[in-house]
Image: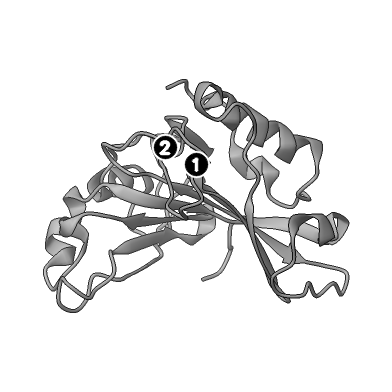
């Protein structure tokens, strides 16, 4: 897979029909062009306070917030949304280890892996304790573990998940609020009563990107 060289957080704050957002989707789709033939349409989930564009075959979900008093109705189709009043406020990138992106336009709402690796993001020059980091750029490859993220970003500002019996718990997650990054982990290592002991070896499953928060 080709490397992603531009920081996709630059898309935050843009509308669904902005040139940069459309170009980004077109670029992603080109990695699957042999299978898909065209940029897939999103599965839109609209609510009065949020609109999600889910691209299952691209391993991608875009979260837009309504602005200027706009309150979309639920279950709106794509053509009925007011793009000029929607701003991108979050990006979820999915990673399904050892599973390649699905080659067909199935309607099954299951995410494939994001087709580009590594994902490159700019990060703060300091961790939450004010210590200087070795790098201000984070390259996230598909097999990065919890330990890899912490060694680069330092201890997270927030964390959760991993509690309860392994059959019913959710995977652990870590958030670096100042960098606008949250990572959810998958696999058996990320769940159950011992998740915080074994989670360091869990591979990431969902990478969430949002506007950095100065306070948390």
For the point 81% across and 55% down, the residue is 79
Q: Which residue is mark 1?
A: 57
Q: Which residue is mark 2?
A: 102
Lower position in the chain sequence, tag 1 or tag 2 = 1
Any part of residue 136 in sight:
no
Residue 35 point in image, percent of width and height: 50, 26
Q: Residues within 10 Å of mark 1 (few under 14, many from 20)?
A: many
Residue 26 point in image, percent of width and height: 66, 30
Q: Residues within 10 Å of mark 2 (few under 14, many from 20)?
A: some
Position of 193 with respect to 10 (left or right) is: left
Query: Would you identify the image quadrant in which residue 36 lies?
Result: top right
Any part of residue 22 in sight:
yes
Q: In the structure shown, which secondary structural element does the residue marked by tag 2 occupy?
A: loop
Q: Between residues 213 and 201, which one lies in front from this camera angle?
A: 201
Q: In the structure shown, which secondary structural element does the residue marked by tag 1 occupy?
A: helix
Picture layout, residue 155 above or below residue 34 = below
Position of 10 with respect to 17 (left or right) is: left
Residue 157 point in image, percent of width and height: 41, 64
């Amino acid at each position: 897979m080709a490397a992603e060289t531009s920081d996709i957080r630059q898309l935050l704050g843009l509308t669904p029909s902005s040139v940069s957002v459309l170009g980004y989707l077109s670029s992603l789709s080109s990695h699957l062009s042999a299978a898909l033939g065209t940029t897939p349409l999103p599965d839109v989930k609209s609510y009065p306070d949020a609109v999600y564009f889910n691209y299952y075959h691209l391993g991608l979900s875009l979260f837009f917030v309504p602005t200027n008093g706009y309150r979309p109705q639920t279950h709106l189709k794509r053509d009925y949304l007011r793009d000029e009043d929607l701003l991108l406020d979050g990006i979820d990138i999915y990673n399904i280890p050892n599973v390649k992106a699905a080659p067909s336009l199935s309607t099954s709402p299951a995410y494939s892996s994001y087709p580009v690796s590594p994902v490159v993001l700019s990060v703060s020059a300091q961790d939450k304790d004010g210590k200087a980091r070795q790098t201000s750029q984070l390259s996230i490859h598909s097999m990065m573990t919890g330990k890899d993220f912490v060694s680069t970003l330092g201890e997270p500002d927030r964390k959760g998940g991993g509690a309860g019996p392994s059959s019913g718990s959710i995977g652990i997650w870590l958030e670096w609020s100042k960098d606008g990054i949250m990572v959810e982990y998958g696999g058996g290592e990320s769940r159950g009563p011992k998740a915080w002991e074994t989670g360091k070896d869990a591979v990431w499953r969902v990478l969430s990107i949002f506007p950095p928060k100065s306070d948390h």
